[in-house]
Image (cartoon, grey):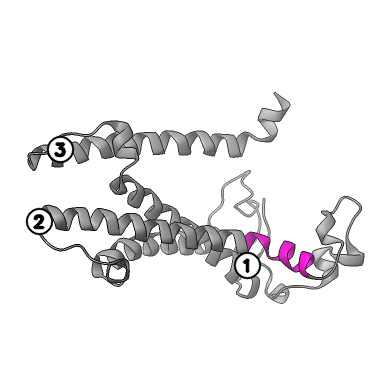
Amino acid sequence: MRWLKENSLSLAFLIMFLLAVGGQAVAGMMQYNDQQAANGAEPVSLLQYVASSAFAVDVAENWQSEYLQFFLFIMLTVWLVQKGSPESKEPHKAGAESDEDQQIGPHADADSPAWAKVRGIRLWLFSNSLGLVMGAVFLLSWLAQSVAGQAAYNAERLGDLRDPVSWGAYVTSPEFWDRSLQNWQSELLAVLSMVVLSIYLRQRGSPESKPVGAAHTSTGVEG
């Protein structure tokens, strides 16, 4: 029970994620089969749909936009600030900060991660590991979206008796960028809303909010 309580946040999101993906697969299959019936084609099973490019492109498209959001937020908040937002550092702390502030090298604590106590490439990698992983997942998701999207796009073109297009032609096409940008704009708006609204609004007990009684001008203060 203690383990469940200590990991309840990640477990709750994992369960909701699995339910959402399962629901998306079922709903997507039903919609896909409706289109198949309209075209006089055979319906597909759930397993066939999940293994299809039509499902893969929708999943990868959402993942890449989410990880782009996190990557940009992680990297931009190193240098950029927003006065009054708990999502921002205090203005005078903009930048990579000192070794003492970051508890690295001789300033590390006894229970600090081992790579925070060393120098060289290991310290650099660990110091930037969150941004590197988020950026890598974004790029891989973007690549998966482009490959699956090309396959799905070409399937539609072949169904319309048109020639398929190359990967390069697809990633420079309006189809690809329309799918990408409509997700990017929603993610960027969500981050903007969180940064600005958290200046003036509160949620008692949430670490994403300032304490209820904190001044609107308080920056980098979490409840």
First in sequence, mark 1 or 2: give its number: 2
Q: Quadrant of the N terminus?
A: top right
**Circle 2 SS class:** loop
Nearer mark to the viewer, of 3 and 2: 2
* Residue 87 can be seen, yes or no: no
Q: Which residue is mark 1?
A: 217
Q: Which residue is mark 2?
A: 160
Q: Amino acid at mark 1?
A: Thr
> Which residues are drawn in magenta?
121-131
Q: Which residue is mark 3?
A: 34
Q: Residue 103 at what x, y percent from top left?
A: 84, 63
Q: Residue 204 at what x, y percent from top left?
A: 60, 45
Q: For marks 3 and 1, give the CA distance.
A: 54 Å
Q: Is residue 41 above or below residue 211?
A: above
**Circle 1 SS class:** loop
Q: Residue 120 at what x, y percent from top left?
A: 81, 71
